[in-house]
């Protein structure tokens, strides 16, 4: 009997935004993330008459199912195993979180696949497998803080844990601006961003930003971690504005949230923003300030949904 694999989503503090090899999902830069306790995916794989994919109890067809099936076929080829598979996934990533679920989904899928075929894989191999489904999933194999080293081949591009049980006081507030599906996928947005005149600078800065973020993590320095995460996210979004043609993931309320974070900071409530390939804003703060920050968002926005998260664990098999 196969077991259910559980993986949590992660938020990148130093972001992956550019592929070197689309097929192998090799990135052009290394990234660093925080795995979150509030959001996860549970996935179970069993033998079946034909390939089937159920998400939150509903049978999925079309491109979303095709992505899963071609992933499973690629993994079967990789490990020399066969068979038709039924995948059942539950995503505990509420729409209100505005977080992409692909990081937790493919980390859980990789672990469920390894369990189903009784492959004896270490976490590095699981991370490489998860990477093939979605780049950010490579990092969700680990809890706490993890780094995805870019590497230059399938063998050398994987995530590793930086600190799986951080003692640092760090909270993330996921602020929902918009629950619509993003119009430009991260894969497309990454490709388009390469036309920005600042793209080479983005690549050149990666080593230094990563080293500084690792240092902030090791020293538990919230101010340094937050300000670097905010800078890195702003640099990523500057690429979208300066791409040719230019585009943006921001909505008017994204800007409003950014300004609120800046204002709160001026008022002495220390917080920083980070934003992925969508309009939703994630606020990094410390426990002592999270309530006041939530209150400020609630009084500045009409109907805002906010979910608070802390550090989550790496991928596990449930009994
Ligand atoms: O791996 P994907 O396709 O989910 O792309 C992730 C892109 C960002 O979320 C914007 C950055 C990151 O490193 O997670």
Image (cartoon, rainbow, N blue to C red):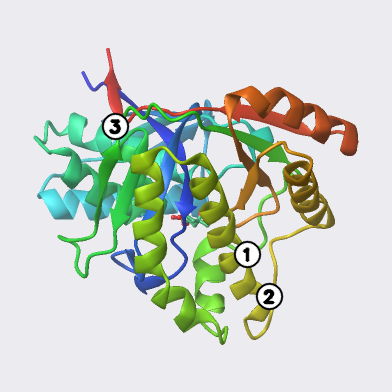
Mark 2 nearby-residue class (10 Å; few <14, some 14–19, many ≥20)? some
First in sequence, mark 1 or 3: give its number. Answer: 3
User: In this rendering, does residue 289 appear at all?
Assistant: yes
Estimate the x, y position of residue 276 in percent, counting from the top left: 58, 54
Q: Is residue 279 above or below residue 104?
A: below
Q: Which residue is mark 3?
A: 48
Viewport quadrant of the C terminus: top left
Estimate the x, y position of residue 289 in percent, counting from the top left: 67, 27
- Report helix, strand or loop for mark 2: helix
Q: Which residue is mark 1?
A: 184
The reply to whether discs 1 and 3 touch (Cβ–Cβ < 8 Å) is no
First in sequence, mark 3 or 2: give its number. Answer: 3
Q: Residue at x 19, y 30 (%)?
A: 115
Viewport quadrant of the N terminus: top left
Query: How far, Cα to Cα, is label 3 from label 2?
Result: 47 Å
First in sequence, mark 2 or 1: give its number. Answer: 1
Q: Residue at x 10, y 50 (%)?
A: 80
State which mark lies toward you, 1 or 3: 1
Q: Is residue 220 above or below residue 30?
A: above
Q: Which residue is mark 2?
A: 241
Q: Is residue 312 left or right of residue 159?
A: right
Q: How many marks?
A: 3
- Report helix, strand or loop for mark 1: loop
């Amino acid at each position: 009997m196969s077991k259910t694999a559980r993986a949590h989503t992660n938020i990148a503090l130093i972001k992956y935004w550019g592929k070197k090899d689309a097929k192998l999902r090799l990135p052009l830069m290394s990234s660093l993330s925080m795995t979150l306790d509030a959001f996860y995916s549970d996935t179970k794989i069993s033998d079946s008459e034909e390939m089937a994919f159920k998400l939150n109890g509903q049978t999925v067809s079309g491109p979303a199912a095709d992505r899963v099936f071609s992933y499973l076929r690629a993994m079967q080829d990789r490990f020399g195993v066969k068979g038709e598979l039924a995948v059942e996934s539950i995503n505990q990533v509420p729409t209100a979180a505005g977080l992409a679920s692909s990081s937790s989904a493919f980390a859980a899928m990789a672990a469920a696949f390894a369990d189903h075929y009784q492959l004896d894989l270490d976490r590095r191999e699981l991370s490489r497998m998860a990477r093939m489904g979605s780049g950010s999933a490579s990092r969700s194999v680990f809890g706490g803080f993890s780094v995805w080293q870019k590497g230059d081949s399938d063998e050398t591009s994987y995530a590793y844990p930086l600190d799986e049980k951080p003692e640092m006081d760090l909270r993330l507030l996921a602020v929902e601006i918009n629950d619509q599906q993003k119009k430009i996928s991260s894969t497309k947005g990454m490709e388009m961003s390469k036309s920005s005149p600042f793209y080479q600078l983005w690549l050149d800065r990666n080593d230094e930003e990563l080293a500084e973020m690792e240092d902030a993590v090791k020293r538990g320095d919230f101010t340094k971690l937050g300000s670097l995460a905010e800078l890195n996210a702003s640099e990523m979004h500057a690429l979208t504005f300066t791409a040719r043609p230019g585009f943006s993931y921001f909505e008017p309320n994204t800007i409003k949230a950014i300004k609120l974070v800046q204002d709160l900071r001026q008022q002495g409530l220390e917080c920083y923003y980070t934003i992925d390939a969508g309009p939703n804003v994630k606020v990094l703060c410390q426990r002592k300030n999270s309530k006041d920050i939530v209150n400020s968002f609630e009084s500045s926005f009409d109907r805002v949904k906010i979910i608070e998260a802390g550090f989550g664990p790496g991928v596990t098999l449930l009994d």
